Amino acid sequence: MATVLFCTDGSERAREAIDRARVLLQPASRVVLVTVTSGVDPSLVTGTGMAAGVMSLEERENLIDIQRNEAVTMLTDLVADLELVGSLETGGDGEVETEVRIGDAGREIVDLATDLPADVVVLGTSGHGGFRRAVLGSVSDHVVRHSPCPVLVSSHAE
């Protein structure tokens, strides 16, 4: 049927979105589970204006490696917890691909959806109100507006 891109930040809302959507989107020929970590601001190494950097390039790279490893562990645990392997009636080998991206979550998800190419993107929403979303930005809002394919956004079930 389709390539499904499930997005998670490790939150319960993201987990609920995946759990709800996988029932709706079966069978899938390809399933990709992605998480995006923000990385470490390069200005911590280079400094800004008159301020010098506060860490070395090696320390920054070590922090990024730690974030990546934590993200891989989270994805592996989520696949096992949700029993995703074999339960999605995939047309392929039944394996769930996992992907860790570093950067802005909205942009990275849209880029991955374009690169795959995905037929549908699934993500949960944190439910921020309009003012908070305008100030902080919204990953789901960005993905809905820029995705090359349909986006299924699931809000928290009360």
Image: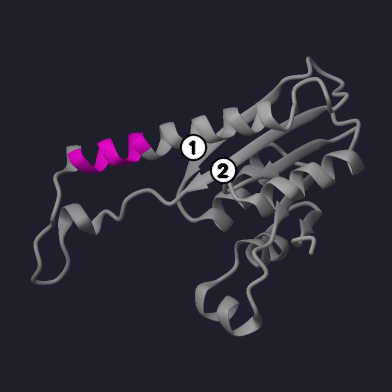
Q: Characterize the local packing of mark 1: few (<14), some (14-19) or many (20 or more) Cα atoms within 10 angstroms.
A: many
Q: Which residues are magenta?
A: 59-66
Q: Characterize the local packing of mark 2: few (<14), some (14-19) or many (20 or more) Cα atoms within 10 angstroms.
A: many
Q: Is residue 104 visible?
A: yes
Most distant residue in the front direction: 158
Q: Mark 2 and 1 residues: CB-CB less than 8 Å, in contact?
A: yes
Q: Is residue 102 above or below residue 13?
A: above
Residue beneath the point at 75% across and 44% down: 18
Residue 71 percent across, percent down from the top left: 49, 37
Residue behind mark 1? 71
Task: Say the numbered circle drawn on residue 35.
Answer: 2
Corner quadrant of residue 78: top right
Q: Main secondary structure of the magenta part?
A: helix
Residue 64 percent across, percent down from the top left: 34, 40
Corner quadrant of residue 144: bottom right
Amino acid found under the numbered disc labelled 2: Thr
Quarter of the image containing the N terminus? top right
Q: Is residue 18 above or below residue 156?
A: above
- The mark that comes first in sequence, 2 or 1, is 2
Amino acid found under the numbered disc labelled 1: Ala
Q: Horizontal placement of 103 versus 17: left or right?
A: left
In terms of secondary structure, where does tag 1 sit? Answer: helix
Q: Is residue 116 above or below residue 36?
A: above
Quick one: 82 or 50, which is closer to the camera?
Answer: 82
Q: Is residue 9 above or below residue 70?
A: below
